[in-house]
Each structure stands twice: as structure tokens, then as C-alpha cells.
């Protein structure tokens, strides 16, 4: 009984933590659904896009490449390069998932997005399978259903509304980052450093745009490892 109560509590915490992600994902996913329809992608394929890929930036990039007639192999390679950051996110989180049974890890790994990583990496609670699966499941459903809703809405929505849906992702990042900046100076420091690195790389065209974000993440992470001591301890909830 105690175990069931603990699992139930962790599931509830996961759903609560997923609320800002759901509010941010749904309008952005609607925007993706709308753009999919204008790109002449079928409802089935658009839905499968979100069901199987579940990577916002990659999905929007793929739509642009499909519009310009880029070959499938090049789209896959570009998506791989864009999502290399998930390898580092997974490696970082793996250190805190050693007690979770392996058969759950494949589902947790599939759910790792930028926002998911922000919540889990900045949390000082012990990460459990029920918490992570609830966090992933709720946000995943929001993204998939948002895609379907956007596609079905189609041209019914005014163009001004369609254009405004795309800012939802930035609002999600702000909602996750600002509270942590208020509590932690290292988070503020790394946020400024990573932003400056990205701006410099992008402004001076030091490397190709597909590598700009990846490079900024790697350099900022290295600076964080060298300059900031990890005082965060896992706590049992």
C-alpha cells in the first residue's frame, strides 16, 4: 500500500510538472499541424510525424526542407545533426537514472526534449520512473493532439492567429528558465554565456547554422563543468 501511494504521488508530481510543457507544446504543435497541411502532407503522415519523431525543431526544419525538395537522405542527416544535443542530454541524465529498471529507459529516452531536460536537470528531487513517465506522457500527448488539432483547424483560423502560435515554445522556455535564474546564480551565468556564444557564432558565421546551437551547448557545458561546483543533492520525495 505504501508503495502504491508513493507511485501515485510521483505520477501526480509528474503531471503537475508537465502542465507548463503542455501549455507550451499544444499551440506550437498546432502551428506545425497547420504548416503540414500547407505543405501538402496528409493528415496521417502529419500525425505520424509527431507520433514517431516528437522533436519540434527537427519537424519544422524537415517541413522547410520538404518544401524546397531536399532529398530524404539529406533531411535525415540534417535532423541527426540538429538532434546531437540529445546525446549530451541523455548522457547527463543517465547519471541520475541508475536505479530505474532498464525496460523503462527506452520510453524515458524517447521523451527527452529540451524542455523535459530543463525540468529534470534543474530539479533536485530524486528522479523516479513514475515521475518521468508521467512528465513525458502528458507532454507527448499534448504535442500529438496539438498537431492533429492544428491540421484539422486548417484554414479556419485567421492568419494572425496562425502566426502567433509559433511563440508558444519561447514562452515555455521562459517559464522554465526564469524561476531557476531567480534561485541560482550559476544558472543565470550559464544562460548568459550560452546565449553570448550562440550570438557570436551566428553573427560572425564562424560555422554553419546547423552546428551553431550544438557548439554553443558544448562550449557552455564545458565552461559549467570547469567553473561551477555541483552542490545539488538528490532528495527522496
Image (spheres, rainbow, N blue to C red):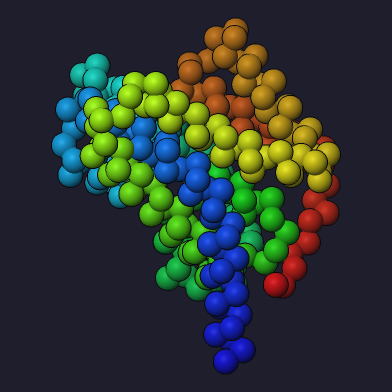
Question: Measuring 39% from the left and 26% from the top, which residue is drawn there?
Answer: 161
Find residue 46 and report its image quarter. Answer: top left
Task: Name the quadrant of the N terminus.
Answer: bottom right
- Note whether residue 206 is visible: no
Q: Position of residue 15 (x, y in %)?
A: 53, 62
Find residue 156 and report its image quarter. Answer: top left
From this view, report whether residue 96 is shown above or below residue 72: below
From this view, report whether residue 20 is shown above or below residue 2: above
Question: Measuring 45% from the left and 58% from the top, which residue is drawn there?
Answer: 138
Q: Which residue is situated farthest in the bottom direction here?
A: 1
Question: Measuring 64% from the left and 43% from the top, which residue is drawn there?
Answer: 176
Q: Position of residue 78 (x, y in %)?
A: 36, 28
In front of the other: 4 or 62: 4
**Number of numbered discs on residues:** 0
From this view, report whether residue 69 is shown above or below residue 96: above
Q: Position of residue 203 (x, y in %)?
A: 59, 9
**Side (left or right) of 56 relative to 155:** right
From this view, report whether residue 182 is shown above or below residue 92: above
Question: Measuring 50% from the left and 24% from the top, which residue is drawn there?
Answer: 211
Q: Position of residue 70 (x, y in %)?
A: 24, 21
**Side (left or right) of 11 relative to 74:** right
**Side (left or right) of 108 relative to 195:** left
In front of the other: 156 or 77: 156
Find residue 103 and report its image quarter. Answer: bottom left
Task: Name the quadrant of the C terminus.
Answer: bottom right
- Note whether residue 162 is visible: yes
Amino acid at each position: 500500500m505504501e508503495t502504491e501511494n508513493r507511485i501515485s504521488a510521483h505520477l501526480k508530481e509528474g503531471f503537475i510538472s508537465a502542465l507548463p510543457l503542455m501549455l507550451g507544446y499544444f499551440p506550437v504543435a498546432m502551428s506545425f499541424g497547420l504548416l503540414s497541411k500547407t505543405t501538402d502532407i496528409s493528415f496521417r503522415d502529419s500525425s505520424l510525424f509527431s507520433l514517431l519523431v516528437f522533436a519540434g525543431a527537427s519537424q519544422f526544419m524537415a517541413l522547410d526542407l520538404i518544401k524546397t525538395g531536399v532529398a530524404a537522405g539529406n533531411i535525415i542527416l540534417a535532423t541527426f545533426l540538429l538532434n546531437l544535443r540529445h546525446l549530451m542530454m541523455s548522457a547527463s541524465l543517465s547519471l541520475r537514472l541508475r536505479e530505474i529498471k532498464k525496460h523503462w529507459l527506452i520510453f524515458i529516452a524517447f521523451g527527452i526534449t529540451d524542455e523535459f531536460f530543463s525540468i529534470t536537470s534543474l530539479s533536485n528531487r530524486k528522479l523516479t520512473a513514475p515521475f518521468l513517465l508521467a512528465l513525458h506522457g502528458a507532454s507527448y500527448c499534448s504535442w500529438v493532439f496539438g498537431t492533429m488539432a492544428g491540421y484539422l483547424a486548417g484554414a479556419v483560423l485567421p492568419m494572425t492567429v496562425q502566426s502567433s502560435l509559433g511563440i508558444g515554445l519561447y514562452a515555455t522556455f521562459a517559464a522554465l528558465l526564469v524561476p531557476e535564474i531567480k534561485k541560482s546564480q550559476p544558472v543565470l551565468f550559464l544562460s548568459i554565456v550560452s546565449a553570448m556564444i550562440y550570438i557570436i557564432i551566428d553573427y560572425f558565421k564562424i560555422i554553419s547554422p546547423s552546428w551553431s546551437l550544438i557548439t554553443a551547448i558544448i562550449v557552455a557545458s564545458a565552461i559549467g563543468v570547469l567553473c561551477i561546483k555541483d552542490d545539488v543533492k538528490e532528495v527522496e520525495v
